Image: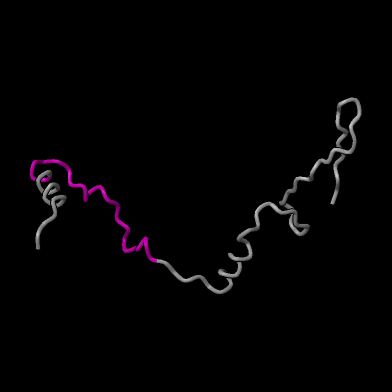
Amino acid sequence: MAQSSAYKHRARRIREGHADPADRRGSWNGVMPVERRTPTLHEARERQRRKYERNRCLPDRDDSFCFLPLIPLRQTDGHALLVQIRA
């Protein structure tokens, strides 16, 4: 089988005394970084449930926050009076 030009270039650099690029590559110690596992049914359902759930005001959460809109009520002297509406 023929050798690639990249292999020939690396071999030549090693012969000339330069560092071997393979020495700088980290060892994964048998770990396959591209290996994937199928999620369980519970994980798949939970992921779908949370897919579009970002910043919602849910009463069962203590750490959640919600922005309440400020609606202009009326205009007086060119200034809008703003009232905060609670849900």
Q: Nearer the viewer, residue 3 or 14?
A: 3
In the figure, is residue 55 to the left or right of 84? Answer: left
Q: Would you say the magenta stretch is mainly helix, strand or loop?
A: loop
> Which residue is farthest top?
77
- Residue 26, given in percent of the width and then of the height, sits at 30, 52
**Residue at figure coordinates x 79%, y 44% from the top left:** 69
Q: Nearer the viewer, residue 31 or 39?
A: 39
- Residue 77, given in percent of the width and then of the height, sits at 90, 25
**Residue at figure coordinates x 32%, y 58% from the top left:** 28
Which segment is the magenta one? 14-35
Q: Tell me which corner region of the image, top left, top right, bottom left or bottom right, holds residue 70.
A: top right
Which quadrant: the N terminus?
bottom left
**Residue at figure coordinates x 31%, y 64% from the top left:** 30
Q: Nearer the viewer, residue 3 or 63?
A: 3
In the figure, is residue 19 to the left or right of 80? Answer: left
- Residue 42, given in percent of the width and then of the height, sits at 58, 72
- Residue 55, given in percent of the width and then of the height, sits at 68, 51
In the figure, is residue 5 to the left or right of 51? Answer: left
